[in-house]
Amino acid sequence: MISFELGINVDDDRWLDALANIETLSENVANTAFNYMELNADLSSIDFDKPLLIGLSLSNDDIVHKYNKEFRGIDRPTNVLSFANMDDDDFTSEAELYDEVELGDIIIAYETTQREADEKHISLHDHYCHLLVHGLLHLMGYDHQLDAEAEVMEGHEINILKELNIPNPYTE
């Protein structure tokens, strides 16, 4: 079983009001995602013998907008941003030096997530879980820039969410 530590930082208290026990929910989502991926994916670039560290910021549109502009050159907020340490050239050599592997950070914007959930007529709970799974997959090296990559990543998302009793987010 994969050992991980999810460091949660609440930048916006609306998360606490909107989703009771969001810390426990987030831990459950991460645990489900890692267990699924350990059994169903090639993650040879991650040393699962060491604890994995993930930073999660429950934030808002203002902060996500700032980071989206600074790091992606996109001048608007988005629902989730992931900063995967695996993308760094020295990730593997750095990971060998320490007793833990820092996978990276995820930031989720409250207003955009709530608005999208409303537009899709789904619960904030389900949409939040989807975005967290999406962010975790990015930290594990998955992407969706190419159609083939997106198909693989979305397949993992659908299966992990199914384990959490959340419907496929890609069906209308």
Image (spheres, grey):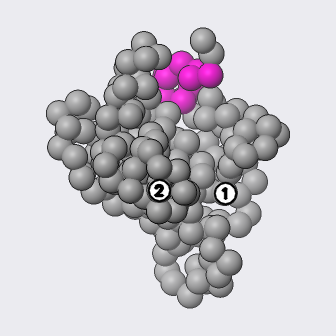
Q: Residue at x 34, y 28 (%)?
A: 114
Residue 35 higher or lower than 95, as above or below: above
Q: Is residue 140 above or below residue 87?
A: above
Earlier in the chain: of badge 1 and badge 2, it is 2
What amino acid is labelled 1 in the image? Answer: Gly
Residue under numbered circle 1? 141
Judged left or right of residue 46, residue 50 is left
State the image coordinates of residue 63 (x, y, percent, origin top left). 33, 53
Residue farthest toward the bottom in the current orientation of the protein? 97
Q: Is residue 168 magenta?
A: yes
Residue 6 visible in the shown view:
no
What residue does disc 2 label? 69
Q: Amino acid at mark 2?
A: Lys
Q: Is residue 155 left or right of residue 59?
A: right
Provide the residue span drawn in magenta: 161-170
Q: Residue at x 75, y 54 (%)?
A: 42
Asked if one can make out residue 44 in the rendered structure from this viewpoint, the answer is yes
